[in-house]
Each structure stands twice: as structure tokens, then as C-alpha cells.
Amino acid sequence: MSKIIKQVLLTICASYALLTNAAPGNETGQEEIINVGLVLYTKSQTPGTLNASWIYSTQYRGPGIAIGGPAEGYSGVYQVRYFREDGSHPEEYELHIEKVGSIYQVDWLLDGQRLITGVGMETAEGLAVGWRQVAD
């Protein structure tokens, strides 16, 4: 995992712990799943395609690919598929990335319903996006 992803994830997790007084574990000794994730999108050699490297909480991570976007930049609508590290549990969404000033607003939709939302910024490595699942 790249240094920037580790730094951003550490900052997100530390902020969450401070805001909620959450401990890294619980009484059972198992790590608590927090509703925070990070994804790094990098441009593929194929126009309109982004490669993804994602992590959710402290327990899940893996690769992904977003297709159907614009030939240049990140803003646009994509079809995205994510996998766990072992290739299992594929998940597919419609990915909306919109640049607003110097930040990106990002939403993941399934059947027209927004399930995940996030905010991102461009880095030397790509587009880094912190995200969370939308509460019911």
C-alpha cells in the first residue's frame, strides 16, 4: 500500500476514534468494523478506465476497475467493480465523480440509489477518495 494511502487512512481512522471515543478493539478482542474506507484511483492506459485499490475499515481491501468514464480527467460516470484481495465478493456500482473546485465529490449508486458517498483529492499517484456507507 502506498505511503499516501496509509497516511490518509491513518488520519481518517484517528479522527473517527477521537470523534466517537472508539477503541481499536472491543471486549471480545476482535477489531471493530468502522464505516470508513479509502480508495485510490489511477488512470489506466485505456482511455476512460480507472484502476482502483481500496480498503474498508481495517478488515477488507482489494483491487477494482472503473470503465466508461471520460477520456481525460476523473470527473464523469463510470461502471465500477471491486473485489477482495483473493478475487472474491465482487461488488458493482455506478460511480459518479464530480470535481468541485479543487476537491471531488464521489457517489456510488446501485439501481439509482446512493449507497456510498465520499470526498477526494488529486495526489501525485492519482485520485484519493475517503468514503463511507450512507446510513439508512
Image (cartoon, rainbow, N blue to C red):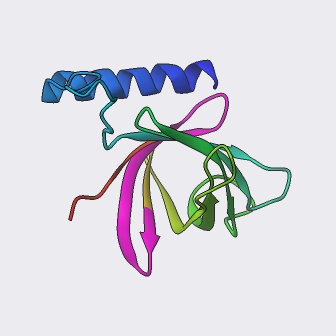
Q: Is residue 36 visible?
A: yes
On the rendered image, what quadrant is the N terminus found in? top right
Measuring from the top left, give residue 119's x and y in whole percent: 40, 45
> Left or right: where does residue 129 sit relative to residue 85?
left
Q: Quadrant of residue 5?
A: top right
Nearer-the-camera pick, 128 or 65:
65
* Residue 69 located left or right of residue 26: right
Q: Is residue 118 magenta?
A: yes
The residue positioned 65% from the left and 43% from the top of the image is 85
Whether residue 40 can be seen here = no
Residue at 30% across, 34% down:
32
How far from the left and from the top, in percent, is residue 73? 66, 52
Q: Residue at x 44, y 70 (%)?
A: 109
Q: Main secondary structure of the magenta part?
A: strand
Question: Residue 8 at what x, y percent from top left?
Answer: 45, 25
Taking the view exactly as shown, the residue that stands out farthest to the bottom is 111
- Which residue of the protein is positioned furthest toward the right in this rendering? 45
**Residue 69 left/right relative to 71:** left
Res 136 quadrant in image: bottom left
Q: Which residue: 28% across, 24% down? A: 25
6 is within the stretch colored magenta: no
Residue 84 vs residue 42, the one in the foreground: 84
Residue 53 to residue 46: above or below: above
For this rendering, which residue is in front, 113 or 102?
113
- Residue 45 against residue 54 in the figure, above or below: below
Q: Which residues are magenta?
A: 108-129
| Closer-to-camera residue (47/93) | 93
Task: Find residue 9 and report its horizontal and vertical position in percent.
Answer: 44, 27
